[in-house]
Amino acid sequence: MRIIGIDPGTAIVGFSILDNENGETSLVDYGCIRTPAGLPQSQRLNQIAEDIDTLVKKYKPQKAAIEKLFFKKNITTAMSVSEARGVIMQRLTEKGVSLEEYTPLEIKNSVCGYGNADKAMVQQMVKTIFNMDKIPKPDDAADAIAAGVCLCNSLALLERINE
C-alpha cells in the first residue's frame, strides 16, 4: 500500500511517500512544498493544492496520514495552517485518498515510543527507522515521514487484530 504523510503548513508543507507491504515499510520519497513569503494566502493555498495534485498523480497513494493541529499561542498562525490543512484534506479526498488524522502526541508515541519526544528525537528515530545517512531536513519533512510511519504502524496493528 502506498501512503502519503503530510505535515501541514502554509509556508512549508512536509510530505513523505511510503510503501507498506507485508509489514515492511520503505521510504520512497520525501520533501517539502514551499510557498513564497509575501504571496497572498489565497495564492499560497492554490499552490499547495496544485502541488498536492502533482504528488498524488505521480505517486498514487491509497492512504494519507495528516497531522492534526495543536497550537498553544499564536491563533493567527493556527488559522492559516488550518486553511492549508483543509485544502490538503479536500484535495486528497477528491482524488480518492483515504485520510487518517493523528495528533502530534500519537505520532511521537508511534515513532519514538514517547509522546513528549522533541523534534530532534523524532528526526533521529526517522533516520534510524529508514537507515538514512543523515537526518531528513527540514524538520517538516521528518514530521511528514513520522506521520506516515504512524499510519503504517496503525495498519500493522489492525492487521494483527483482524487475524
Image (cartoon, rainbow, N blue to C red):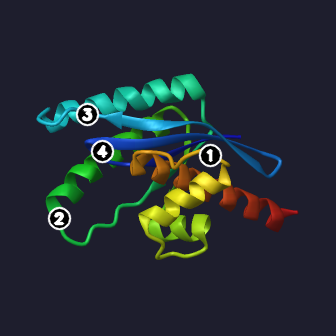
Between tags 2 and 4, which lies in front? 2
Between tags 1 and 2, which lies in front? 1
Left or right: 92, with 10 as reference point = right
67 relative to 137, above or below: below
Disc tally is: 4
Residue 28 location (% of width, % of height): 63, 35
Q: CA distance from mark 2 to mark 3?
A: 20 Å
Q: CA distance from mark 4 to mark 1?
A: 29 Å
Q: Quadrant of the N terminus?
A: top right
Which residue, given by chain and number where applicable, does mark 1 sit on? 132
Label 3 Cα neighbours within 10 Å, binned few <14 / some 14-19 / many ≥20: many
Label 4 Cα neighbours within 10 Å, binned few <14 / some 14-19 / many ≥20: many
Earlier residue among tags 1 and 2: 2
Label 1 Cα neighbours within 10 Å, binned few <14 / some 14-19 / many ≥20: few
Q: Residue at x 27, y 67 (%)?
A: 71
Name of the residue lying farthest toward the right = 163
Residue 115 location (% of width, % of height): 51, 75
Q: CA distance from mark 1 to mark 3?
A: 27 Å
Which residue, given by chain and number where applicable, does mark 3 sit on? 35
Left or right: 79, with 63 as reference point = left
Residue type, numbered disc 4: Ala
Residue 146 location (% of width, % of height): 54, 55
Left or right: 60, with 40 as reference point = right
Residue type, numbered disc 3: Thr
Earlier residue among tags 4 and 1: 4
Q: Assign a secondary structure to mark 1.
A: loop
Residue type, numbered disc 2: Asn
Which residue, given by chain and number where applicable, does mark 4 sit on? 84
Q: CA distance from mark 2 to mark 4?
A: 16 Å
Q: Assign a secondary structure to mark 3.
A: loop
Between tags 4 and 3, which lies in front? 3
**Residue 74 shows which numbered tag?**
2
